[in-house]
Image: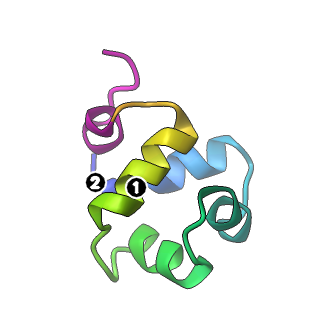
Amino acid sequence: MQLTKRLQNLRTDLDASMRQLARATGISKSAYRRIEIGESPATIEHLCKLAEFYEITLSGLLDGVDKP
């Protein structure tokens, strides 16, 4: 699964807006939006913040598997 689709699915599963997710993770709304739509690549810092927020590993975030 592409990271963009994975991020969208995770966010919508929480019924959260991009703005809410950006605030909760400390990522700017514009940066988060660009990452989710595939306009910009996510930095390792962004990936770590997102994985921590969703309480999954980086591997889980990237490959779509939530549990080790």
The residue at which mark 1 appears reads as 5
Which range of residues does the magenta coloring cover? 58-68
SS at circle 1: helix
Q: Is residue 9 above or below residue 22?
A: above
Which of the colour schemes (rainbow, by chain, secondary structure, one colour) is used? rainbow
- The crowd level at tag 1 (other Cα within 10 Å; few <14, some 14-19, many 20+) is some
The quarter of the picture where residue 47 lies is bottom left
Count neighbours of disc 2 (C-alpha within 10 A) and say few if under 14, some if 14 to 19, many if 20 or more.
few
Q: Say which of 55 and 45 sits in front.
A: 45
Label disc, if present, on residue 34 of the rendered structure = none
Q: Kindly identify which residue carries mark 2.
A: 2
Q: Is residue 12 left or right of residue 5?
A: right
The C terminus is located in which quarter? top left
11 relative to 8 in the view: left or right: right
Q: Are marks 1 and 2 in contact (CB under 8 Å)?
A: yes
Residue 49 rendering spot, x and y as whole percentages: 47, 52
Identify which residue is drawn at 61% across, 78% down.
Answer: 29
Image quadrant of residue 60? top left
Percent position (x, y) of residue 66?
A: 40, 25
Residue 4 seen in this snapshot? no
Give the structural element (helix, strand or loop) at label 2.
Answer: loop
